Image (spheres, rainbow, N blue to C red):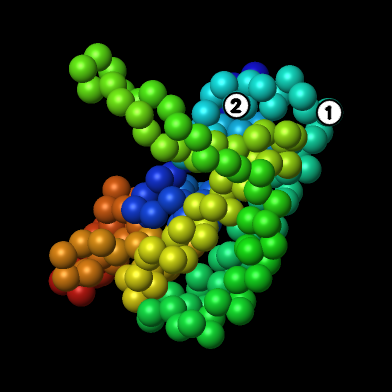
C-alpha cells in the first residue's frame, strides 16, 4: 500500500534539524514522518543515515511491531531534543549547557560501532580508507545514527544561526548559513510565498 505521507522535508541545511522537522504542517494537516516503523525506515533511508541493505537485514530480524516501538523511541528523542534546541537557539552554546545533554550521551553509550580499513574509490582512484561501521544487532540500533547526528550537530553548529521559521503557523527550524544570516523562512516555496501573498492582500486592502 502506498505511503499517504508526502515526501519528507529536508530544508534545514542541517540533518539534526531535519530530524526535528519530521513532524510539521506543510499544508493544512500535521504530518509525522516517523509516526510508525515504516515511516521511520523510509526517513532514515531518505536522510542517508542507514543504507538500504542494512534496513533489509533488520527487517528480516524484526519481530511484529518492533519497528513501531523504535519509532516511538525516536519520537521521544525528537521532542526532548526539540526542547533543548528551542531553549538555546539564537546564541552560542555555553559549556555549562553540556549538562543538559546527558540523555544523548546515555544513548550514544549503547553504540556498538568500530573502525575498519576498506578499499575505497574506483579504478585508478582506488585506495585504502578508514571508516566507522556499526554492528546492527537489532532494530533498536536504528536510533543510534540519529543520536550521532544530533551529537555532531550540537558540537559543529553555531547555535547563533539556528532559527525557527517566521511563518505564523510553521514549526520548522533551520540553520541559517546564508551570507549575512538573513534567512527568515523554512522555504520560499512554502512560508516565503505565504508571506508574500499575505503582504500583497494587505496592500490591496489598504489601497481599497
152 in relation to 132, above or below: below
Residue 102: x and y in percent read: 65, 71
Q: Residue at x 70, y 52 (%)?
A: 110
Looking at the rendered structure, the secondary structure element under dot 1 is loop
Q: Residue at x 74, y 35 (%)?
A: 138
Q: Which residue is mark 1?
A: 64
Q: Which residue is mark 2?
A: 54
Residue 155: x and y in percent read: 44, 66
The N terminus appears in which quarter of the rendering?
Answer: top right
Q: Residues within 10 Å of mark 1 (few under 14, many from 20)?
A: few
- Whether residue 102 sits left or right of residue 138 in the image: it is left
Looking at the rendered structure, the secondary structure element under dot 2 is helix
Residue 170: x and y in percent read: 45, 61
**Residue sitting nearer the eye, 154 or 177:** 154
Q: Which mark is first along the chain, 2 or 1?
A: 2
Residue 5: x and y in percent read: 55, 35
Which residue of the protein is positioned furthest toward the right in this rendering?
64
Of discs 1 and 2, which sits in the foreground? Answer: 2
**Residue sitting nearer the eye, 152 or 48:** 152
Amino acid at each position: 500500500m502506498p505511503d499517504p505521507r508526502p515526501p519528507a522535508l529536508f530544508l534545514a541545511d542541517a540533518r539534526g534539524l531535519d530530524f526535528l522537522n519530521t513532524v510539521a504542517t506543510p499544508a493544512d494537516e500535521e504530518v509525522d514522518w516517523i509516526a510508525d516503523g515504516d515511516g521511520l525506515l523510509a526517513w532514515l533511508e531518505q536522510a542517508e543515515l542507514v543504507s538500504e541493505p542494512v534496513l533489509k537485514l533488520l527487517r528480516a530480524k524484526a519481530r511484529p511491531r518492533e519497528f513501531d516501538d523504535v519509532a516511538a523511541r525516536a519520537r521521544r528523542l525528537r521532542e526532548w531534543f526539540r526542547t533543548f534546541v528551542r531553549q538555546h537557539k539564537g546564541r552560542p552554546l555555553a559549556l555549562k549547557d553540556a549538562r543538559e545533554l546527558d540523555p544523548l550521551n546515555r544513548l550514544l553509550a549503547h553504540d556498538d560501532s568500530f573502525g575498519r580499513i576498506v578499499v575505497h574509490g574506483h579504478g585508478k582512484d582506488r585506495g585504502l580508507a578508514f571508516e566507522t561501521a556499526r554492528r546492527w544487532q537489532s532494530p533498536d540500533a536504528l536510533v543510534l545514527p540519529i543520536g550521532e547526528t544530533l551529537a555532531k550537530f550540537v558540537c559543529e553548529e553555531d547555535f547563533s544561526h539556528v532559527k525557527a521559521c517566521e511563518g505564523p503557523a510553521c514549526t520548522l527550524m533551520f540553520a541559517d548559513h546564508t551570507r549575512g544570516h538573513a534567512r527568515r523562512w523554512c522555504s520560499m516555496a512554502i512560508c516565503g510565498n505565504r508571506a508574500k501573498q499575505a503582504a500583497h492582500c494587505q496592500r490591496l486592502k489598504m489601497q481599497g
